[in-house]
Every structure is written in C-alpha cells, then in structure tokens.
Image (spheres, helix red, strand yellow):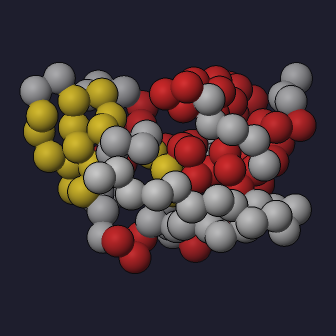
Amino acid sequence: MASSRAEIVAEILYGLKKEDQYATLSSIARRAGFSPGSNCRTIAACMTTIQKDWPHLEFWRGIHDDGVVPKNTPQAEALQGQGIELRDEGENWTIILAEDKIVVWETSLDGKAIPVKPAAG
C-alpha cells in the first residue's frame, strides 16, 4: 500500500504528464512538502513505490538532479522512447532537455514557499 507521500508525488507526476514537462527529484520532493533526502534517497524510494503501485504513471519524468540516468534502465528506455536526447557518458546517459521543459516550482502544494538554494560559488 502506498504512503500518503507517494500519493502526493503521484499527483505531481500526473501534472507533469498532463503538461508534458519534467522536474528534478529534489524539486518534486519539495513540491510535495518533504526533504528529498541525502543524494535524493528519500524521493528515490518514493519513486520506486510509485513504479510498483502505479505503473501507468510516467515516473521517468522525475529526473535525478545531476541529469544522469543509468543505461539499460526503464527510465532510460522511456526517455529514449519519448525522443529525449541522451548524451553517452560511458555507463550512463546525460539527459538533454530544453530549459522550458523543466518545471521549477516556487511553492509546495500546500502553498508554502520553497526556499531557493543559493548558487555554489
């Protein structure tokens, strides 16, 4: 049985599908109102639940923050099937998306502001 967290993330993924958009895992987690976890582990676990419980949802619209996807995975295959450009990086692909295809939300679903991370420098 899916957690309420997974249900919220599923709702976000459905919205991405309707708009033909993509979002980073950390952005999806913050939109859902929780921390993505170290190296996005928390949101990745949530995405695994979604793949199992709602296989019809386009989980692959949630991309890792570094834009990398391992080769020979369901996500890589789905992205290729959608015609998304993938750059060969050895064992992985780097996802190439136009900036206007990536959603960046300013608020969580409950209306709270999402803090903007300062640029590293």
- Residue at the (35%, 71%) spot, across then down: 99
Q: In front here: 53 or 87?
A: 87
- Residue at the (54%, 31%) spot, across then down: 40
Rendered-image quadrant of the N terminus: top right
Q: In front here: 50 or 115?
A: 115
116 is higher (above) or lower (below) than 98: above
62 is higher (above) or lower (below) than 44: below
Q: How many marks?
A: 0
User: Farthest residue toward the bottom?
Assistant: 100
- Residue at the (65%, 70%) spot, across then down: 106
Q: In front here: 112 or 88?
A: 112
User: Farthest residue toward the front?
Assistant: 121
What x and y, as percent, mark residue 94?
Answer: 23, 43
Please tell me in which quadrant of the rendered image residue 96 appears: bottom left
70 is higher (above) or lower (below) than 36: above
What x and y, as percent, mark residue 114?
Answer: 68, 61
Please tell me in which quadrant of the rendered image residue 119 appears: bottom left
83 is higher (above) or lower (below) than 9: below
- Residue at the (84%, 68%) spot, across then down: 111
Please indicate whether residue 8 sits to the left or right of residue 117 in the image: right
User: In this view of the protein, can residue 48 be seen by the observer?
Assistant: no
User: In this view of the protein, can residue 57 be seen by the observer?
Assistant: yes
What x and y, as percent, mark residue 102?
Answer: 45, 65
What x and y, as percent, mark residue 47?
Answer: 62, 33
